[in-house]
Image: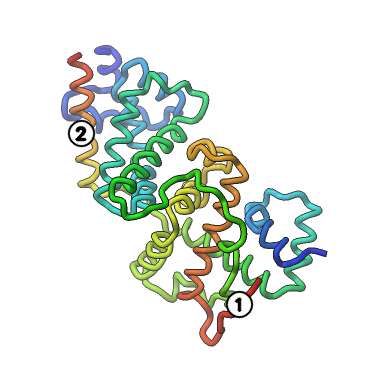
Amino acid sequence: MLTCKDFLGELSDYLDETIDAELRAKLERHITECPNCWVIADTTRKTIKIYKGMESCSIPADVESRLMAALEKKIAAKQQK
Amino acid sequence: MKEAAARAGYDGKHRVQMAVSSLTGIDEAELVTQAREGETAAFSELVRRYEGKIFRLAQHVTQNREDAEDVLQETFMKAYEHLDQFKGDSKFYTWIVRIAVNQSLMKLRRRKTDKTVSLDETIDTGEDTVVREVAAWGEDPEQRFSREELGDILGSAIESLEPLYRSVFVLRDVDELSTEETAEVLGLSVPAVKSRLLRARLQLRERLTRFFKRKGDDAFAYM
């Protein structure tokens, strides 16, 4: 019989879907019987999702132009050696 | 070099922009090979591909825009300088992430605003995986809060994590590196990455629950 603590220990692998079918079935049985663990699994899944959804990989134009200027200086210095 | 530069459109101030249009479809390993042979434009394309991710990672780890910009520049400077030391055993991106994480942690150490910047800290078992708030979330937080408000909430939640948890969470769940790649980047074992990731996720979940819980739901102690 899986305890809540056991469930929590497997939560990351469960959400990442990196566990075998047998363990997955046990964990899923547990959350159908344990509302607290269901909420934790659901809100942790949403936590991961919301960070993925919000994150932008764009770089501010001023930061990029300073980076490029610094690199050009570095490249020019190396080429002069 | 001159031939390579001409092929890539190397032309003084315009070389970076020229590189973007001619090398966008080339795969990372090929770009690295060309860059190691001295093709500046190939290196510029690698920078263009990863600058946004490195800047975001540095912002998350340092929690400071100015430091993040320094880290961004130092990362690509070091990568350019030590390109001959990159053996190609791992992905180029993993290699520069490692440089960026090290530079970011150095910034934190210098600022001395955080005493826990070591990634090798002994894992204590228990306290961090205690779950204290088990309220279900209300409607979609993206509907409930403006993008700006949501950004502030997510930013402050991640800022409250210790650097070692922050780094693991950002690499695994934001950058989507594998557990093994994250372990390689941070110089940690796979079980250590998994343990830190679980704690980071649970701590973030708990902090976000304070904002996103359904109205009327009381939080209660658990486990």
Label 2 crowd (10 A; few <14 / some 14-19 / many >=20): some
The structure residue drawn at horizontal position 54% and vertical position 87%, both measured from the top left corner, is: B216
Secondary structure under the numbered disc 2 in the rendered image: helix
Secondary structure under the numbered disc 1 in the rendered image: loop
State the residue lying farthest toward the bottom: B216
Numbered badge on residue B6: none
In the rendered image, residue B102, in percent from the top left (x then y), is placed at 39, 39
The structure residue drawn at horizontal position 38% and vertical position 50%, both measured from the top left corner, is: B61
Q: Amino acid at mark 1?
A: Ala
- Quadrant assignment, res B127: bottom right
Q: Is residue B4 above or below residue B178?
A: above
Closest to the observer, B167 or B53: B167
Label 1 crowd (10 A; few <14 / some 14-19 / many >=20): few
Left or right: where B95 falls relative to B20: right
Q: How many circles with numbers are drawn on the protein?
A: 2
* Proximity of marks 2 and 1: CB atoms separated by less than 8 Å: no
The structure residue drawn at horizontal position 75% and vertical position 56%, both measured from the top left corner, is: A24
Closest to the observer, A7 or A65: A7
Q: Amino acid at mark 2?
A: Ala
In the rendered image, residue A67, in percent from the top left (x then y), is placed at 24, 38
Subunit of label 1: B
Subunit of label 2: A
Cα separation, mark 2 vs mark 1, equals 52 Å
- Quadrant assignment, res B52: top left
Residue picked out by circle 2:
A70
Q: Is residue A36 above or below residue B113?
A: below
- In the picture, which quadrant includes the C terminus of chain B? bottom right
Q: Is residue B144 above or below residue B95?
A: below
- Quadrant assignment, res A30: bottom right
The structure residue drawn at horizontal position 27% and vertical position 13%, both measured from the top left corner, is: B1
Left or right: where B182 falls relative to B50: right
Residue picked out by circle 1:
B221
